[in-house]
Each structure stands twice: as structure tokens, then as C-alpha cells.
Image: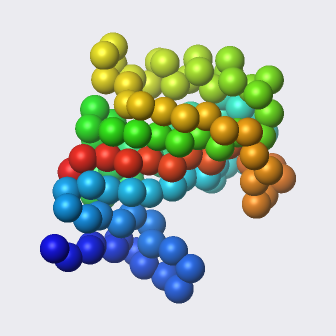
Amino acid sequence: MTIERINPSQRWSDITIYNGIAHFVEVPECEETDIESQTKAVLAQAEASLAKAGSDKSRLLSVTIYITDFADVAGLNAVWDAWFEPGTAPSRACVKVELADPAWKLEMAFVAAV
């Protein structure tokens, strides 16, 4: 089976697809500093990436959320819960970390069926 790489560069590919499964990561591409705005930005970016891969948010299998402050989990969850139709949320892990850009409050790694 072949591996499809969407927008590959020397350091990473925007999306990697293998055997009908897409993998990609999103970081907040916005100026906002609050968790709700950054979460909305990441999820909007994820929708665009899912479309590029031939999928949508109802086909998400798993999401790993990297967050810098557990005090922000309630704000993250409010946006997350509103984003999904009932019964379509994927499995998820939420891990506290230090991210590459100190302005980022979160980063998400997605796995989806295509």
C-alpha cells in the first residue's frame, strides 16, 4: 500500500494517509490568546484538513489534545462539545505539556477514516 503525503516538506507533511486512515496535527493559527478562540481555530483548521483528506469530523477516530494548562480544560470542553453532533465524538486523550510556541494554549493530533 502506498503512503499519501499532502503538502510534504522537509520537516513534516500537513496530512499523511495510509490504508484509509489520515493523520494530521493542528496548532492555533490565530492571534487570539484565550482557550476558546484557539480551540475554535484549531477545530476549523481540522475541518479544512479533513476535507483535503476526503473526510469530515464525523469520521474522526481519535484526537490527542496537548494543553498547557489544565485550568483551560473547561473552556476547551465547551467548544469541543458544541463542535460534535451527539454520539459522534472520537476517543480522546488530553495531556499537559509545554508547546513550541509559548502563545499556543493547545495543539491537537487527529486520526480519521477517509
In the rendered structure, the answer to whether residue 2 lies left or right of residue 12 reads: left
Residue 52 position in % (x across, y down): 30, 58
Q: Is residue 78 visible?
A: yes
Q: In the image, is residue 47 above or below residue 6?
A: above
Residue 34 position in % (x across, y down): 76, 32
In the rendered structure, the answer to whether residue 2 lies left or right of residue 105 reads: left
Give the farthest residue toward the left: 1
Q: Which residue is drawn at 58% across and 17% down?
A: 78
Residue 38 position in % (x across, y down): 65, 39
Residue 77 position in % (x across, y down): 59, 21
Quadrant housing residue 94: top right
Q: Which residue is drawn at 44% across and 25% down?
A: 83
Looking at the picture, tell me which residue is in the foreground, 60 or 6: 60
Give the farthest residue toward the top: 86
Q: Which residue is drawn at 80% across and 33% down?
A: 69
Q: Is residue 44 visible?
A: no
Q: Residue at x 53, y 85 (%)?
A: 10
**Quadrant of the image for the N terminus?**
bottom left
Q: In the image, is residue 27 above or below residue 89?
A: below
Looking at the picture, tell me which residue is in the foreground, 31 or 108: 108
In the rendered structure, the answer to whether residue 40 lies left or right of residue 111 reads: right
* Count of marks overlaid on the render: 0
Give the farthest residue toward the right: 102
For the rendered model, the colour scheme is rainbow
In the rendered structure, the answer to whether residue 60 lies left or right of residue 96 reads: left
